[in-house]
Image (cartoon, grey):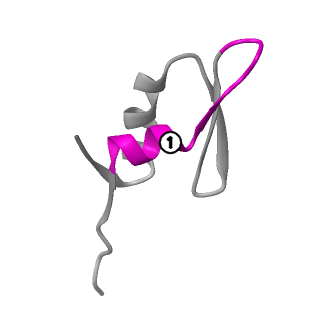
Amino acid sequence: MSATIKTASFEYLISLAEEKVEGGYDFILDGSTYHINDVLEISRIAEKHGYIVIY
């Protein structure tokens, strides 16, 4: 069985976050939606999904 390595650049992941008028962001990754206050939370979320984040 081979493992898949998922990588994503931090800049790309930030581009997936949509700023909300009332504050914060909606961030969708692999079909899961997260409501976050700061884009710095994106790295932690991506790592939970098994991504290696490239800075």
Q: Nearer the viewer, residue 54 or 15?
A: 15
Which residue shows up at 30% across the image and 87% down it?
1
Report x, y in % for residue 25.
63, 26
Per the image, the residue denoted by label 1 is 15
Q: Residue 16 appears in which quarter of the rendering?
A: top right
Report x, y in % for residue 45.
46, 38
Q: Is residue 15 magenta?
A: yes
Which residue shows up at 40% across the image and 24% down it?
40
Q: Residue 3 appears in which quarter of the rendering?
A: bottom left
Report x, y in % for residue 28.
62, 45
Left or right of 51 on screen, residue 42: right
Which range of residues does the magenta coloring cover? 9-23
Which residue is farthest left? Answer: 55
Q: Secondary structure at mark 1?
A: helix
Which residue shows up at 66% across the image and 56% down it?
31
Can you say whether 9 is above or below 43 in the image? below
Figure label count: 1
Report the amino acid beneath label 1.
Ser
Which residue shows up at 46% across the image and 37% down it?
14
Left or right of 7 on screen, residue 45: right
Q: Is residue 36 magenta?
A: no
